[in-house]
Each structure stands twice: as structure tokens, then as C-alpha cells.
Amino acid sequence: MTQRDALPSLGDGLPVVAIDVGGTTMKVSGVGPTGAMTAPRRVPSPPPGPGSADEVVRIATDLVREESERLGVSPAGLGIALPGVVVEDQALGVYSENLEWHDVDFRAAFAQTLDIPVAVAHDVRAAGAAETRLGAAQGASTALVLAIGTGIATSVQVDGRLHVGRGYAGEIGHAVVEPGGEPCVCGNRGCLEATASAGAIRRRYERDAGTQVDGAKEVLALAAAGDPVAVAVRDSAFDALALGLSHAVTLLVPDVVVIAGGLSEAGDALLVPLAERLERLVRYGPVPPLVRAHLGEDAGLVGAALAARDALAPTGAAQTSR
Amino acid sequence: MTQRDALPSLGDGLPVVAIDVGGTTMKVSGVGPTGAMTAPRRVPSPPPGPGSADEVVRIATDLVREESERLGVSPAGLGIALPGVVVEDQALGVYSENLEWHDVDFRAAFAQTLDIPVAVAHDVRAAGAAETRLGAAQGASTALVLAIGTGIATSVQVDGRLHVGRGYAGEIGHAVVEPGGEPCVCGNRGCLEATASAGAIRRRYERDAGTQVDGAKEVLALAAAGDPVAVAVRDSAFDALALGLSHAVTLLVPDVVVIAGGLSEAGDALLVPLAERLERLVRYGPVPPLVRAHLGEDAGLVGAALAARDALAPTGAAQTSR
């Protein structure tokens, strides 16, 4: 179903291993000296709770050994993209809702199990870096890569540099678009994510229609077929996405906005109505083009590979600010 | 009435002249070799319309000559802060609503009248730079300086660099906080500025109460005294300000937000309820302190002086990105 480009080449450099840690799956790929990435493999993520971070480190260590054999060379470094709140330059996993960890020093943890440098990345920022350097936002100076999936967050690249904001930059899924609106997992009401994430679209449809669906994609299909409940859910989700995006666009005036994450697989059924709404909301300054991500669900993995390469040869790489 | 600090010293350096061009007044100050700024003088801005930019250049040229005499030394450069949409590194006045100019090349214009380098600044970004380098946001890496006056706009400093965004960054006065709401000068409806600027607060009170007031300050005083129309106008304005600010804060996670512009003279009557509302809206990441501007209405002038100094000795100065 997923239409996407093949994994891009990173160009000549040291061999590295890239891992993208998700809430349910860990993906791994090896990068050879020519920059070609091996086809991603998937293993289950550990269950949430105490010890999940140690388990992630243990599994990742095994994956590095296996990829080393697949590559036929010893990797010179590991790049690992983590979910939640991450401070890259401290290798700190501040908080993961899905895996339930707090304040994990991944550099110290990997120092016990691996003798190669480990670059810690944040999944959304890693995906943003990948799209900006090798994907849909190539050449953009200021760019947002908005991931719409279970949650909603954006990478924030300003004038060529990724902005970290103490680990919290770009969490616009928790910006309020409707004060007093839908309850959100964060405890607030009316967050963008509570109305417009793929999970929220499914939940709201099931609640309002009284029937179960497979996911947001099915809700969009039902809306396209004229189901009035699906139309209402879809339109309010698109309204909320456009409103949230319009604030980010007005503040930063990005050159391009890349739409990524599971919902981006809807393609023009999402991009066209979202662009129309954005045009109506942003009247004062330039409205950036909305483009679909090129790297699809592998953007985080590619970003992790870039982080590993950057850590080994930082000169000339895109800077990541604090 | 206005409580503010004295003009700060810029430190040793070349003597320059600073001019801040507003919709109704041009302010000028000279900066001597010790960095002390002369007390600001005011002259009327030219009327809007064709020729206003030429008139600004003519008046500014006269002011430079006069300041030269006040200083007792020849200034080595001029810094001039302009309203509207400005692209600093091209010295371009893209658009001014108040003075009605379009695409004015101020470098070319001043080349006809002055034989010293002219640094063009944007009034809100200049004020932001001044507050960040010498005022209320000193030491902050990521900071917003939100000016609430006739209009609403913020300077956007990200990781130590001012973001220009093709001249349009930070125009959050035109971000929609209430789709379909109050009509805005930009042609849209529901913009932050249409509900919450000092001008909007006065206009909305006069419309709803059917009586004239002196300005937003009087509306806030009436609200404090219990006037129900004033309370409603004030509270909706503060709600809108907090909502707009919450989106910027969630996206960028600034270290501090400086509240500037005419409405900031309300002090704690604005800052305290705004901070309370922001705390309620921003639940996921850190909420920055809101502080009152230190440089008051002279921040743009100080920023123009900094721009002039930077242009003459750019090394070590804060960077302004494209």
C-alpha cells in the first residue's frame, strides 16, 4: 500500500548501523562504506515499563552485531532514533510515553555494551533531517516536517539548523486548537493531536458512528464515499491541522512543509484540502508548498544513519542546535 | 506614566546614529564612542503615500547631520529601523501599511544622500535584538519579544540567531485565533491582532459599550474597576494573546518571552493573567517566564544603534539570518 522511494544513498563514508525505536517495533539498517543502506529489518520493541530502556540497549547491541555480519565490515558507529522527548547532545531520553522511561542516559548505557560511538537522535527530528538533506525538503533553509500518525509533531529547521528546544521543540500536537475541546492524553483539552492524529480520527469516528474501523485511512475512504459522520470527522481534523500549521507557518515562514507519518499515505486526499485551508488562513505572508514526505516510514531510520555518520565526521554536516 | 530603564550603553566603539521610523514619529539618537546614547528626539514621520520613502530618507539624512553636531564627532554609520515587512540584508522595505511603500531599496536611496554605511533593521526584530542583548532577555538562546501595540508581532530568536523568514517571520498578529472572528485590516477574520492589539481593545470596547475611550489602557482600568463590557473585552483579548503565544511557545520552547509595545505598560495587569492562561494552555513542555521589556518604547532605537555598530564591526555580533 505504501508508495515510497527506495532508501537513499548516504554517499561514501564510514560504515554505520542505524536503528529507529518505535513504540511497537525497532527497525535496523546497515550502511556500507558506499552509503547504501541495507533493507530495513524489524524486531518487536520491548514492553513498556521499568527496564524498557535497558532492553532497548540490549536489543540494539544484538542488532549491531547482526548488521555487522550482514555488512561484512565492522560498523564504526551506531545512530539510534528514540521516541518521546530527547536531548541529542546529552544522549538523554527525557521521557517516553510509549515505552515509559524517564531521564535515561543512553550514552552511559551503551558504554557498557558497545565499544563504538553512539549518536542519539530524536525520531521526529531525525526524520526531519532525513527529509531535509535527502528527501522532500532538500535545499530548504527553513522547513517543517510534520509527522501525523499516532501523535502529531514537527521537526523545526530554522535557517539551516535543526532546533531542539531542550528536547520539546515542535510538539505542536499539544498546541490547543480548540479550547475546552476533545480530551488529550497529555491531560489537556483541545490539543491538535486529540482532534487530528490518525488515532484521534479513528477514535472519534468509532465514537460518533458507533461502529469500528480499521484506522484513519478507512475513515478517509468512508468520507470520500460520502459517509456524513466520516466527512464531519475528517473535515474537523483537517481544519485543526490547518489551524495548527498556520500558526507555525506565520511564526517561521518556512520554505516548505513536508507532510509525513502514517496519515501522509492518504496523499492528495490530505494534501489538497490541507493546502486549501492553509491558503485561507495565512493571508499576510507567503504560504509554503505542502509536499508529501519522500522517505515515508523509513525517514527516522535514515535520520539515525545520518546522525551516526555526522558524529563520526561532523565537519560539513547540518548543525543541530541545543 | 511609562516606567522604564535609562537607555543602555552600547560599550566602546565607533560613533553612529540610530533612527527608528514609526507610523507617526521618527526618533533619533546619537551614539558616542563610549557607547552612551543621547536622549531620543522626535520628529513627525512623513504622510503615507507615494514619496513617503524618499521623505524618510531626506529627513533621516538631516537628522544624521544634526546628531553629528550634538555628538561633536562624525558618525561612522547609520542604523535605521523600519516598520512593516523588511529584509535586512538587502536593505529592502518590502511593504509598509502605515507609510504605504512597496519594495523600496533603502541602500540605493541613502547612497544618494549619505556617504556612510547604512544598516537597515526591522523595528520588531531590532527591538528583539536590543532586549536580547541589552534588556530583559539577556543571555537567552531562544527568545520571543512580543510587541503588543497598534499591531502585534514578535521577534524570533532561535538558538542565538534572529530569524528573518524573508521579512515575514513573527507576524503572529495575523495568525488566526478564532476562525470567522473579528475582521482584520489584512482582509482576514479572527486574527490575533483583530482581537487583542491595543487598537482592537479600544475599538471593541467603544463598539460594545457605545462610548469613547482614550485607549486600551483606559479599557484595562475600566475592567479593573469592574465595568462588565471592559472585563469581557479584556478577557477575550488576553485569551487570544495566550492562545497565540501558546502555539509559538509549543513550537519553539523559548527560554523567555518578553512582552513589549504599548500594552506592556499595563505591567502585571497584563503579565499575570497572561502567564496564568499560558500555564493552562501549555501542558506538555516547559512554560517560559513572561517578563516585561526593559527598554520600553526605545527598544527599536537601541536595536537600530546595534545594527549600525554591527555593520561596522560585524565580528562577534549576534548573527541575523536570512
Image (tube, coloured by chain):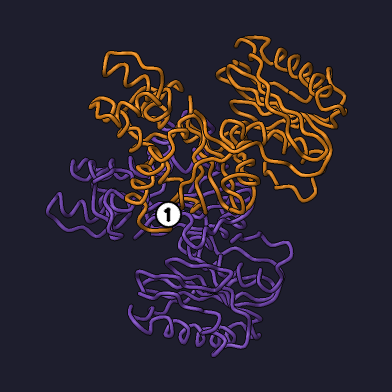
Chain colours: A purple, B orange
What is the x, y in percent for residue B127? 61, 36
Residue indicated by mark 1: B287
The subunit letter for the residue under badge 1 reads B
What is the x, y in percent for residue B218? 37, 23
Could you say which is closer to the camera, residue B268 or residue A180? B268
Report the side of B56 relative to B224 (left or right).
Answer: right
Q: Quadrant of residue A227?
A: top left
Q: Indicate the quadrant containing the N terminus of chain A: top left, top right, bottom left or bottom right.
A: bottom left
Would residue B318 be seen by someone viewing this image from the given angle?
yes
Q: Is residue B83 above or below residue A91?
A: above
What is the x, y in percent for residue B77? 82, 31
Would residue A268 be seen by someone viewing this image from the given angle?
no
Q: Indicate the quadrant containing the C terminus of chain A: top left, top right, bottom left or bottom right.
A: bottom right
Identify which residue is drawn at 40% across, 46% down: B246
Q: Quadrant of residue B200?
A: top left
What is the x, y in percent for residue A265? 40, 54
